[in-house]
Image (cartoon, grey):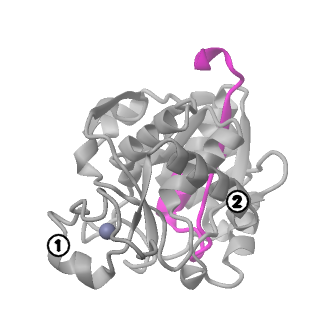
Amino acid sequence: MITQQPYVGRFAPSPTGRLHMGSMVAALASWLDARSQGGTWLLRMEDLDPPREVPGAADDILRTLEAFGLIWDGEVVCQSDRHALYAEALESLKRGGHAFGCVCTRKDLASTAVDGLYPGTCKAGLPDGETPRSWRFDMPKDVQRWEDHGRGPSSVAGDAMGDFVLKRADGHWAYHLAVVVDDADQGVTHVVRGADLWTSTAAHMALQQAMNLQTPEYVHVPLVKNDLGQKLSKQTRAQPVSPRDAADVLAKACQSLGQPIPDVDAPHAMLQEALASWDVSKLRENAVS
Ligand SMILES: [Zn+2]
């Protein structure tokens, strides 16, 4: 039973820029949830998409977390060192009949996709002599249900995801495969992350089932939005958080997680107070769909 395992949590940023308020909230929530249960907190760098990465960002993220007092356990794991694990996972999915080769180009999909989802063109097999450009997961249509500690009872239909890509035509591993393989390989029992990944949980659970992996507990935390109601990201030009404003940043982060704002000034004392008062059930009151 998963509840009897020691708690292992993680924060898994992509080095596509400096930490902004949205990523800080996810980092803080996963740290608080892990530490409040005496758990381990791992740090994994999700650096599988070199074209999107910014030189120096990985190091900057680590230094910022340290400055805020969010100290991880053990070595930082980098996805870029783990290609062999993902290749092995893809082979096991192919053997189990869960993955299929796809020759569709982006241009093909622009005209064939249904509601933005893969239409199943290559599912029945490729014509003789065709080599797959990418590999896709044969996503079961059943509804995936889980008890989300951030949002309450959750269900997402398999067809909301479509047959998503496991390995891209450019040879890069897709996020969904890597995150599932890594969480299982690192023994992660609790995934605390932004609500933008709530729907993707159906994809992750289906992959876990196809590979006979344990499903961790999921906690999706509210997204931080800007004044225009957009999710904070590099695309929406979110400003990086600065350790110089640590007290302010921590107060805002606690507020957006529905937690009491610590009434001390020193950032490290604030963190301890936030830890003492962390109540995951308050996330639900703050959850927005
Ligand atoms: Zn195809």
Does 77 lie within the magenta span?
no
- Say whether mark 2 is within 8 Å of ligand 1: no
Q: Nearer the viewer, residue 180 or 27?
A: 180
The region drawn magenta spans 1-27
Left or right: where does residue 99 sit relative to residue 44?
A: left
User: Residue 41, relative to residue 149: is it above or below?
Assistant: below
Residue at position x 50%, y 28% from top? 279
In the image, residue 16 lies at what x, y percent?
Answer: 57, 76
User: Residue 234, relative to residue 92: is it above or below?
Assistant: below
Q: CA–CA distance between discs 1 and 2?
A: 44 Å
Q: Nearer the viewer, residue 203 or 121?
A: 121
Residue at position x 34%, y 34% from top? 151
For label 1, the crowd category at 10 Å Cα-Cα, with few meaning under 14, some 14 to 19 and many 20 or more, is some
Which type of secondary structure does the marked residue at label 1 adopt?
A: helix
Q: Which residue is mark 1?
A: 112
Left or right: where does residue 233 sit relative to residue 61?
A: left
In the image, residue 187 lies at what x, y percent?
Answer: 69, 35
In the image, residue 109 lies at what x, y percent?
Answer: 24, 75
